[in-house]
């Protein structure tokens, strides 16, 4: 970590100056929903903040930090799921997501209830049956309520394509994860 000392699990710097760290619960939810791993989700969120800090240091003006960070986290999550390391990993038995442990001094029960409702263990197991892009589209649309134009911008595909991807993902989820 080259940009300073971690303070309370966060890096100080330009991201903090804009209040962007307030988006951390949303970003963690997106990353955790995609990876099913607390450690990987935290790494992805941290990488997104680091990327935003580097972009700002390079002179890039970021008009909407929330959109920038959500896009970065989603794309980093897709890249993570596509990586050779993840494909090489084999699980003995059924894959189960890593449980989220609630620290006593962390966010309140409301924030954790919101995460628990949208990212239950059973739901994450069903998401595992989706491709990385299907998972991203489904999460952004169904769980976080993004509109198709926003999903298309984040994913880098057309709005029509995102609608098709979402429909296929929803069918697969409704079928209990079996390929349609």
Image (cartoon, rainbow, N blue to C red):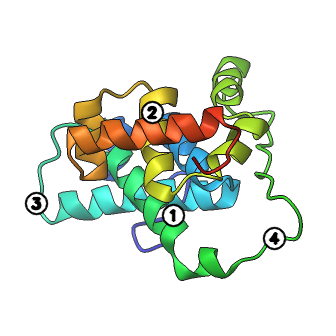
Q: Which residue is mark 4?
A: 91
Sequence-first tag of 3 and 1: 1
Residue nearest the observer in this picture, 90 or 69: 90
**Residue at 42% in and 74% down:** 2
Q: Which residue is mark 3?
A: 59
Q: What whole-number distance in Å separates the C-alpha atoms at marks 4 and 3?
A: 44 Å
**Badge 1 element:** loop
**Residue at 54% in and 65% down:** 81
Q: Horizontal placement of 58 versus 13: left or right?
A: left
Q: Quadrant of residue 101?
A: top right
**Badge 2 element:** helix
Residue nearest the observer in this picture, 137 or 116: 137
- Of badges 3 and 1, nearer the viewer stands 3
Sequence-first tag of 4 and 1: 1
Count neighbours of disc 4 (C-alpha within 10 A) and say few if under 14, some if 14 to 19, many if 20 or more: few
Q: What whole-number distance in Å separates the C-alpha atoms at marks 4 and 1?
A: 36 Å
**Residue 35 in view, yes or no:** yes
Residue extending furthest toward the top:
110
Sequence-first tag of 3 and 2: 2
Q: Which residue is mark 1?
A: 5
Q: Which residue is mark 2?
A: 22
């Amino acid at each position: 970590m080259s940009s300073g000392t971690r303070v309370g699990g966060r890096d100080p710097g330009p991201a903090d100056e804009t209040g962007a760290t307030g988006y951390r619960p949303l970003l963690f939810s997106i990353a955790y929903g995609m990876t099913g791993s607390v450690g990987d989700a935290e790494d992805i969120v941290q990488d997104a903040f680091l990327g935003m800090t580097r972009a700002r240091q390079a002179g890039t003006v970021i008009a909407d930090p929330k959109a920038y960070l959500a896009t970065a986290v989603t794309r980093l999550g897709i890249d993570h799921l596509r990586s050779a390391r993840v494909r090489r990993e084999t699980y003995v038995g059924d894959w189960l997501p890593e449980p989220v442990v609630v620290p006593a001094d962390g966010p309140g029960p409301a924030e954790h209830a919101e995460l628990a409702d949208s990212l239950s263990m059973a739901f994450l197991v069903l998401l595992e049956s989706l491709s990385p892009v299907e998972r991203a589209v489904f999460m952004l649309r169904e769980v976080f309520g993004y509109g198709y134009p926003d999903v298309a911008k984040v994913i880098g595909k057309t709005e029509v394509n995102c609608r098709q991807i979402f429909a296929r993902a929803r069918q697969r989820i409704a079928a209990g994860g079996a390929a349609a």
